[in-house]
Image: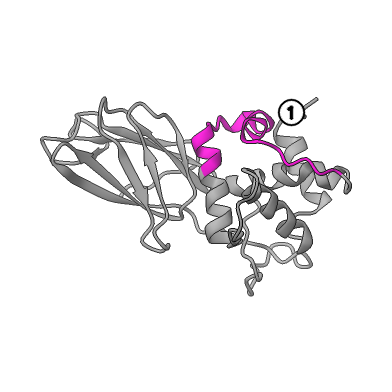
């Protein structure tokens, strides 16, 4: 087992690397894992193999990491990296991220003993995306604008997220965390983002106090 502190990284592949995967179809330097606070990123350094990261604890959630993708953020506390080649799956390994710890607001330094109804981690990337989605309504309750994916990418530019990463986190919020339901009739393309904003604000999952996360971590859109 390899242990990483935030800011550290390991390489994996057939070798010479930190984590050796003894399979001839795996690249010598197949990829890299970076530890970032309480989550991690993966870089696919192969030329033609797509990697898949899923979680044994989830309900089929997974992330595809195409060749050449660098520092793709992974939201799973327990993730399984699957390397594939022309013949199919060849190797896999597990990554354990730090468990998210919440402190009781009235007792600093003490662990929260009960889980909230909707367990959202305010330090996670998906939560920052949710705050960015809610920002226009938080600043002006009469505003009907829902930020687009490109606007979120600009708003959270410090994270270096691409369109696929933002879409993944939005989908993760909608399907797993907040479990929004698709309407029966056809609706506008941004129905999922609008539903997340409506649900988050209706239940005070995101408040004006959370806007400071955006102010201290990113630039404000004009």
Of residues 107 and 143, the one nearer the viewer is: 143
Q: Does the magenta stretch mainly form a helix, a strand or a loop? A: helix
Q: Residue at x 64, y 62 (%)?
A: 102
| Residue 178 is one of the magenta-drawn residues | no
Residue 141 relative to residue 168: left or right? right
Residue 36 at least partly seen? yes
Q: In this view, does 207 lie to the left or right of 103?
A: right
Residue shown at 64% from the left, 50% from the top: 187
**Highlighted magenta segment, given as a residue range:** 143-167
The residue wearing badge 1 is: 219
Q: How is the image coloured?
A: one colour
Is residue 164 shown in magenta?
yes
Q: In this view, does 10 lie to the left or right of 141?
A: left
Above or below: residue 182 compared with residue 107: above
> Can you see residue 127?
no
Q: Does residue 24 lie above or below 193 as drawn?
A: above
Mark 1 residue crowding within 10 angstroms, few (<14) / some (14–19) / many (20+): few
Q: Which of the 4 quarters of the picture holds residue 10?
A: top left
Name the spot of residue 213 as percent of width and height, x first: 73, 43
Position in image of residue 49 (x %, y %): 25, 33
| Residue that extends furthest to the left in the rendered view of this protein | 24
Q: Is mark 1 on a helix, strand or loop?
A: loop
Q: Which residue extends farthest front?
A: 185
| For residue 29, above or below residue 94 | above
For the residue pair 52 and 32, the one nearer the viewer reads as 52
In the rendered view, tell whether residue 162 sits above or below residue 194: above
The image position of residue 145, as x and y in percent, is 78, 40
Query: Which residue appears at 89% of the width and 47% of the height?
Result: 142
């Amino acid at each position: 087992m390899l242990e990483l502190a935030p800011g550290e990284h390991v390489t994996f592949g057939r070798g010479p690397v930190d984590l050796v995967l003894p399979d001839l179809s795996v690249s010598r330097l197949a990829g890299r894992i970076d530890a970032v606070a309480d989550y991690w990123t993966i870089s696919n350094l192969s030329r033609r193999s797509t990697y898949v990261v899923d979680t044994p604890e989830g309900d089929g959630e997974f992330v595809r990491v195409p060749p050449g993708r660098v520092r793709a953020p992974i939201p799973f506390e327990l993730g399984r990296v699957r390397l594939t080649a022309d013949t199919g799956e060849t190797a896999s390994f597990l990554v354990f991220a730090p468990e998210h710890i919440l402190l009781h607001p009235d007792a600093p330094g003490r662990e929260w003993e009960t889980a909230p109804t909707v367990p959202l981690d305010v330090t996670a990337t998906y939560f920052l995306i949710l705050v960015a989605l809610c920002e226009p309504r938080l600043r002006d309750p009469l505003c009907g604008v829902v930020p687009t994916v490109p606007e979120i990418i600009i708003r959270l530019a410090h994270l270096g997220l691409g369109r696929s990463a933002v879409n993944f986190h939005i989908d993760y919020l909608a399907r797993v965390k907040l479990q929004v339901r698709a309407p029966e009739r056809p609706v506008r393309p941004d129905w999922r983002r609008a539903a997340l904003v409506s649900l988050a604000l209706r239940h005070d999952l995101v408040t004006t106090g959370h806007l400071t996360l955006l102010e201290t971590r990113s630039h404000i859109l004009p």
